[in-house]
Amino acid sequence: MQEKKLAPFFQKEIVLRKKCTSIGGQAVIEGVMMRGPKSIATAVRDEKGNIVVESNYLTPIEKKNVMFRTPIVRGFLNFGSSMVSGMKTLLRSGEVFGEDAEPSKFETWLAKKFGVDLYDVVMTFSVILGVALSLFLFFFLPQAITSFIQSVAHINISNIGIQIGMNFLEGFIRILIFVVYIWLTTLMPDVKRTYMYHGAEHKTISCYEHDLEMTVENAKKMTTVHDRCGTTFMFIVMVVSVLVFSVVGWQDFEGVGKFLNSLIRFAIRIALIPVVAGVSYEILKLMAKYDNWLVRILKAPGLLLQRLTTKEPTDDMLEVAIVAFKTVLQMEEDPNTPVQRFDVKKPLKKVKAEFEEKLKAVNADSSEVEWILSISMGIKRSELALKNSICESELEKAKKLLDERLQGKPLWRIVGDIDFYNCKIIISDDVLSPRPETEELCEIALNLIKDEDKVLDLCTGSGCIAVAIAKNSKAKVSASDVSKKALETALKNVNENQVSVELIESDLFEEINQKYNIIISNPPYIPTKEIDSLDKEVKNYDPMISLDGGEDGLKFYRLIASNAASHLEKDGYLLFECGENQAQAIKDMLIDFDVEIKKDFSGIDRFIVAKLKG
């Protein structure tokens, strides 16, 4: 379709529009939203200067309720839907620039008491406030000014013609307030930047409609005005409201006071908003179908008003708008195009508090929250205190870990590995998940080990003890276990940590044919009858072979104590980790040793340090 030449303030140059598109847009905070019949995309330039995109698919109009296709009604519904989605998009774009602010007490109270997200509250409040402000500025205020003029000028409104004339005056005042309001917003620097992005949106759409390659250079040649702009629609709404309100709701009701009459007229105008919006929508669609002198005259005021709501954009703004447009264009053409999300930041303190509250349901230690967050953020737990925010992508990972943890699965089995004495230890279903106390056992052993000592880790399981000692000493380390699958996991940990450990498949000492300077063991020590009373995260996930220590839990200690001396060098050491209230009984077994019982950090007798008697 050939585009006619318009007045100079409507268009900078004569161009030919070769194709039309149903894609429209909206300026947002430091970006542009583009929307097609089946998809929507928002592109924003973040604080680092990168263009980030969030996109999604929409329900096609043909699949929506029939009311969205019914003339007049569809206009009001689409207007309301666009206002809500536009507000959501505006707030969402603002999140890209969100400060690392701590949640307020009110925020925390809302979330805890009602499970309400402050973002939803802000969005709802913003919509309500926006509607209230519009009603005040464009309905209540024009009516109040008109009533004041009528009162001061002593105008007798008993005549119908005068009443209609006063309503026309009210409509003129409404339009004047609308124009002044828009002009005042242009004085605000942040709003002016938004209007520049509005201009970028129009230029980008025009560039496509003129069948030019979507580049910044081509888009710069286009005009900042477009006849499908929402500003034009709003102006049409103002004009239609003047016509409708001039013939409806102007009469006074007898026997009713002046103030009540004003309220009734105000209520009638509010009730007619759906009609005004619906009629305006149909007029806009009708005007889009034709291009003649009459249509151009009708479009002229809206196009002129766009000179206020659009400004000449910078090149980087055009880049953002083009990215948003191309994203929607691709999604419209290929429904398999993956959606994208902004990776915005969330206050870390608020997230941590929410996670801690939820983990109370499984009696988890509060430290697990720090582990979940640090793992999801790819940082050390010690670095977490230096962070104030967490990205949404990291938060999604954290939520998945939390959900599994709330089902009772131990954290380290969810993650698949654990940080043990500065070693990464892989955990499988065939081995016990290492406990913090076992790190203390490693510390005791390392304080005893001399260079070139030979060390045996008996009942090695995951190999965590053997790996930690091999990585932190010059000892020659061997590790044995009766379970072949456990040894397979131990081998993975040996390779993962790049250490040298000899792995031996052996039922305790059966296949052990040499002597060692130190033998370390953390054997199964739970009494058989107590296993059912263990926390489900232990009894349901740790292998039974790593838990069951026989009738009194001391089965393996007896077997090891009776054979250890023959596998130790002179002055060799036997080190045990044991269960609560087991240390003294184990000490009594070790008649060939000088025995010392050591406590763990919790003050429990946890470790046996036994030196072979000379």
Image (cartoon, rainbow, N blue to C red):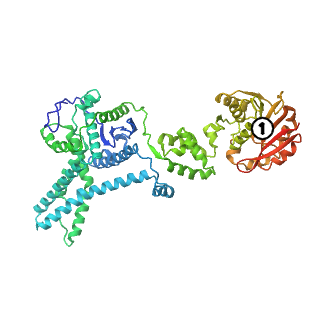
Looking at the image, which is closer to me, 506 or 494? 494
Does the image show residue 543? no
**Count of marks, rendered view:** 1
Amino acid type, label 1: Ser
Instruction: Provide the residue designation for mark 1.
Output: 521
Q: Is residue 552 above or below residue 53?
A: below
Q: Residues within 10 Å of mark 1 (few under 14, many from 20)?
A: many
* Rendered location of residue 169, percent (x, y): 14, 58
Q: Residue furthest bottom?
A: 255
Apparent side of residue 302 relative to residue 45 in the rendered image (left or right): left
Q: Residue at x 73, y 47 (%)?
A: 600
* Rendered location of residue 586, percent (x, y): 83, 45
Q: Residue at x 30, y 42 (%)?
A: 26
* Rendered location of residue 19, percent (x, y): 24, 30
Q: Residue at x 72, y 30 (%)?
A: 487
Q: Residue at x 41, y 46 (%)?
A: 98
Question: Which quadrant would residue 264 be assigned to in this image?
Answer: bottom left
Apparent side of residue 186 relative to residue 394 in the rendered image (left or right): left
Apparent side of residue 493 relative to residue 18 in the rendered image (left or right): right
Q: Secondary structure at mark 1?
A: strand
Quarter of the image that includes the C terminus: top right
* Rendered location of residue 434, percent (x, y): 69, 40
Q: Is residue 173 above or below residue 395?
A: below
Question: Which quadrant would residue 223 be assigned to in this image?
Answer: top left
Apparent side of residue 214 relative to residue 451 in the rendered image (left or right): left
Does the image show residue 22? yes
Looking at the image, which is closer to me, 70 or 314? 314
Looking at the image, which is closer to me, 235 or 374? 374
Quarter of the image that includes the N terminus: top left
